[in-house]
Image (cartoon, rainbow, N blue to C red):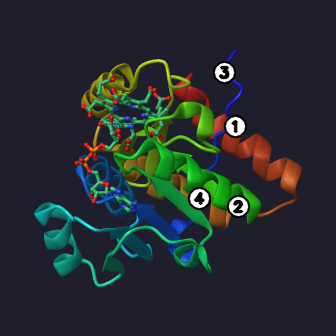
Amino acid sequence: MNTLFPIFVKVEQLQLLIVGGGYVGLEKVTAVLSNAPAAPVTLVAPEIRDEIRELAGQYPNLTLVTDLYHKNYLTGKDLVIVGTNDKAVNQQIQQDCKAQKILVNVADTPALCDFYLSSVVKKGDLKIAVSTNGKSPTFAKRFREVLEEILPDSLQETLDNLTQIRNKLKGDFQEKLERLNEITRVMK
Ligand SMILES: C[C@@]1(CC(=O)O)c2cc3[nH]c(cc4nc(cc5[nH]c(cc(n2)[C@H]1CCC(=O)O)[C@@](C)(CC(=O)O)[C@@H]5CCC(=O)O)C(CC(=O)O)=C4CCC(=O)O)c(CCC(=O)O)c3CC(=O)O
Ligand SMILES: NC(=O)C1=CN([C@@H]2O[C@H](COP(=O)(O)OP(=O)(O)OC[C@H]3O[C@@H](n4cnc5c(N)ncnc54)[C@H](O)[C@@H]3O)[C@@H](O)[C@H]2O)C=CC1
């Protein structure tokens, strides 16, 4: 059974730390910024890939720190993603986060993760997160591609129209709910 509880996080109002500046660091920072371009992100690692440095040029909210991890870097952080190539360091960071009740993801060790990243399908305001419970990230990626392909671009227009109707509808909650259910019945 997949017991993960999906939520959509307002990461733009949280402080995120990424530890590790290699391929995994790049993948994770790209995933975050492609969803939330203004999210405040700090990335710390002694060696940081050029692609990440280029991103920092594009995103003023991405702060790079060329240093080894130290517990002090957790101060003020809400979420941490760990992706160094040193298992012992990854484990230490996870323990430090748990001690401070900071939610942590250790990319290559599912057992040490409080949360997983997902494959994200985006069509305007519609966002669908795909999880395989850690079973196959590649399946999640492929399924994202399938959904992106089949969902029409006109979805945004539908959402905008529904928002207008939603804002115009008078009456109590129950009446509005019934009307909106009626209008969207065509989707079934
Ligand atoms: C548990 C989880 C924790 C987490 O990272 O949050 C995790 C763990 C691991 N990933 C590994 C490998 C790969 N990960 C990807 C890709 C993605 N991985 C992502 C999420 C997750 N990966 C979480 C579970 C998500 C779920 O439930 O499905 C995605 C969805 C989101 C993102 O990272 O942004 C993103 C696709 C984004 C997209 O394109 O849509 C690819 C493919 C590729 O890069 O093309 C490969 C190589 C092929 C393969 O192995 O499948 C390894 C082995 C490492 C090793 O061998 O050393 C582990 C560790 C382990 O499984 O033990
Ligand atoms: N979850 C996932 O999607 C995947 C996970 N992995 C695993 O993740 C790990 C990292 O992979 P890559 O990014 O490809 O490695 P990499 O070698 O490209 O980068 C490692 C990074 O960790 C940094 N680092 C090392 N010690 C550190 C410390 N004490 N403090 C801060 N930063 C430190 C290095 O400076 C470098 O930036 C590997 O163990 C790999 O097996 C690999 C592929 C996919």
Q: Residue at x 45, y 42 (%)?
A: 87
Where's the N terminus, which quadrant? top right
> Where residue 153 sits: x, y (%)?
28, 43
Label 2, label 1: how many angstroms apart (C-alpha)? 32 Å
**How many numbered dots are placed on residues in this image?**
4
Q: Which residue is the site of mark 2?
A: 169
Q: Which mark is residue 2?
A: 3
Q: Nearer the viewer, mark 4 or mark 2?
A: 4
Q: Which residue is drawn at 40% across and 41% down?
A: 120
Q: Earlier along the polypeptide chain: callout 4 or callout 2?
A: 4
**Residue situated in front as seen by the camera: 87 or 79:** 87
Q: Residues within 10 Å of mark 4 (few under 14, many from 20)?
A: few
Q: In this view, does 108 lie above or below 21?
A: above
Judging from the image, what secondary structure is the residue with disc 1 in?
loop
In the image, what residue type sits under mark 1?
Answer: Phe
Residue 130 in view (yes/no): yes
**Residue furthest to the top:** 1
Q: Which residue is the site of mark 1?
A: 5
